[in-house]
Amino acid sequence: MSFNFSNKVSGLQPSAIREILKFTSDPEVISFAAGNPAPEAFPADFVKKTSDELLSSNPVLALQYSITEGYTPLRDILKKRMESQNCFSSERDELIITSGAQQSVELACKVLCNEGDTVICEDPSFIGSLNSFRSYNTNLVGIEQEDDGINLEKLEKALKENKNAKMIYVIPNFQNPTGRTMSWEKRKGVYELAHKYDVVIVEDNPYGDLRFAGKDIPSIKSIDTDGRVVYVGSFSKILAPGLRVGYSSAPHDIIQKMVVCKQVSDVHSNIWAQVICERFMAECDLDAHFAKLRDIYRAKCTLMLDNMAACFSEKISYTKPQGGLFIWATLPDDCDMMGFCSRAVQEFKVAVVPGNAFTMHETDKTSSFRLNFSTPTDEQIIKGCELIGKLSKEMFD
């Protein structure tokens, strides 16, 4: 039988990049291609203890249907914490719990964008969000980044040229895939342009608590005086991604529509996981936990950067993130990036993610690739950098 697929999915195709990433299933391959938190960062003992207590004392809470907006005690404790960070206004905003941050982004697009509307993103950007936008047949416009974030001049040019722009999507802290952090000046600039051209900002902040160098920078949401910022957060990087708990703070009207759309999608997010997250926030020393996470990622990032400096060809440049999970490396302009990544995994047994996985269109030209330092062991980081270094010097020196 042949099928006539909907317009929403007919244009979605398996990525050619997957042909490279499928080699990561080989146990001999060292993977710098993941985006997973470090397993040693998971508070497994706390999750087990809390889960046992919950299922013993109140199993119905964990196993029964719940409300779409999310577990009320979790929402309350998040509102209080976010209000202290100026990421939530009790007068203007509401908060919804979602099945991971990516669902928050997807729901925001579903609520705000019609087919053919323009979504403006940093270029490159997170592939999961880009695919969400593509699934609604939006027009993706990418804006190049500088060392301190999105190019404001080109952002304004795109807003002028795309009268149907509905949304600006940004990851200001330790951006995926580049690891860059948007400066305070540029955060203010993005907000001013959104106000000027009357578009909504979706501020995705899954890595904000993972700063291990430099000083915290206020969120764009903190300067939102007219209710145009949808702020997205997640427990995936600070607790465990398998729980699939994210959240979004936005004006009441937007959250109301997101609730209706989520009812159609999955009714509500896993209530057991939401209770675990609430107990985690209420009972754990969050400052101590975040300090532990930062120590882990600081050490892993430093180890990878040191070994890249020692082993890689000097013709490869790369970002030096102050937090998060990723480093963005750039080859000489005239090189075959896909060929480099293919040889890395097939001949040298090290997997990285080709940069065009994160561009607006897979055919866009880029000479960059992404490395992840959180998932591999220290031994794998050292060995993997040595092997990529051999390949880089063979190709470029």
Image: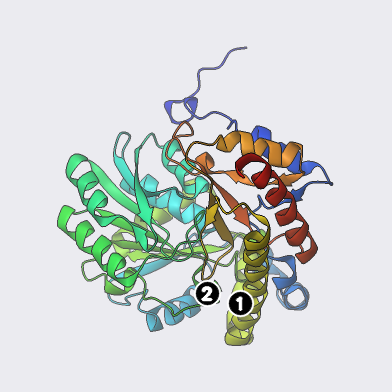
Q: Residues within 10 Å of mark 2 (few under 14, many from 20)?
A: many
Extreme-front residue of the structure: 397
Q: Nearer the viewer, residue 358 or 53?
A: 358
Residue 17 in view of the camera: no
- Quadrant of residue 376 within the rendered picture: bottom right
Q: Position of residue 128 (x, y in %)?
A: 52, 47
Residue under the point 31% across and 39% down: 114
For the image shown, how many numbered marks are present on the structure?
2
Q: Nearer the viewer, residue 326 or 86?
A: 326
Cα separation, mark 1 vs mark 2, equals 6 Å
Residue under the point 25% across and 49% down: 154
Q: Position of residue 287 (x, y in %)?
A: 57, 86
Q: Nearer the viewer, residue 333 or 131?
A: 333
Mark 2: which amino acid? Arg
Image quarter of the C terminus: top right
Q: Position of residue 303 (x, y in %)?
A: 68, 68
Q: Dot 2: what SS?
A: loop
Q: Residues within 10 Å of mark 1 (few under 14, many from 20)?
A: many
- Quadrant of residue 137 within the rendered picture: top left
Q: Are marks 1 and 2 in contact (CB under 8 Å)?
A: yes
- Quadrant of residue 99 within the rendered picture: bottom right
Residue under the point 32% across and 52% down: 168
Name the residue carrying label 2: 211
Mark identifier at residue 294:
1
Left or right relative to 20: residue 192: left
Earlier along the polypeptide chain: callout 1 or callout 2?
A: 2
Mark 1: which amino acid? Arg
Residue 131 in view of the camera: yes
